[in-house]
Amino acid sequence: MRNILAVARWVPFVAISIASLWASARTTEGYRDPIFDWDISWPAIANALTKMPHISSMLMIFVLGVLAVGVGRLWLAALLTFMVGIGWELVQMPTIGNNPRLADLAPDLVGISIGWVIVALAVMSWRRFQHRYAGRGG
């Protein structure tokens, strides 16, 4: 039973990651030779940071990653989530209508960072609450 639960914890992360990679690779305009925009200038990063879907998607995927690996391995959840973001950019390379950019990894990092802070604060609050009310029967 314990093994089933260990595997089941990974299902949401893997399913959403694969679905997001599939959605990122979709195009109605066809395919081209792979291209990649390596611009990492401040204006490119500032433009990328306006992409709220990147930020919110990474936050959600990070939380699912935490569910998969546990709260004791936030670094692993962050790494796995960032790898999904890199995957988004890679699968967009041959698609017409999608523009893979190195600067698009900046909002991914912001979403992961926000998720890390939220999870860390929630865990600290939960542990403080448990400690405060431990032994009070009730």
Image (cartoon, helix red, strand yellow):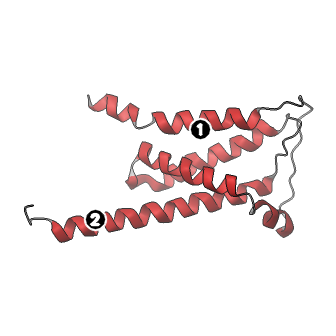
Residue most extreme to the right: 33
**Front-lying residue, 36 or 62:** 62
**Front-lying residue, 114 or 3:** 114
Residue pictured at 39% horizontal, 49% vertical: 70
* Quadrant in the picture for residue 128: bottom left
Residue pictured at 63% horizontal, 62% vertical: 110
- Give the numbered dot on residue 127: 2
The reply, left or right, for residue 2 in relation to residue 29 is left
Report x, y in % for residue 30: 89, 28
* Quadrant in the picture for residue 56: bottom right
The reply, left or right, for residue 125 in relation to residue 30 is left
Judged from the image, the secondary structure of the residue bearing numbered disc 1 is helix
Residue pictured at 78% horizontal, 60% vertical: 48
Residue pictured at 48% horizontal, 45% vertical: 64
Say which label, 2 or 1, has the lower sequence index. Answer: 1
* Quadrant in the picture for residue 83: top right
Report x, y in % for residue 87: 69, 40
Give amino acid for label 1: Ser
Judged from the image, the secondary structure of the residue bearing numbered disc 2 is helix
> In the rendered image, which residue does mark 1 sit on?
17
Q: CA distance from mark 2 to mark 1?
A: 30 Å
Q: In this rendering, is residue 28 above or below 99?
A: above
The reply, left or right, for residue 11 in relation to residue 59 is left
Report x, y in % for residue 10: 45, 36
The reply, left or right, for residue 82 in relation to residue 90 is left
Give amino acid for label 2: Arg
Figure quadrant of the N terminus: top left
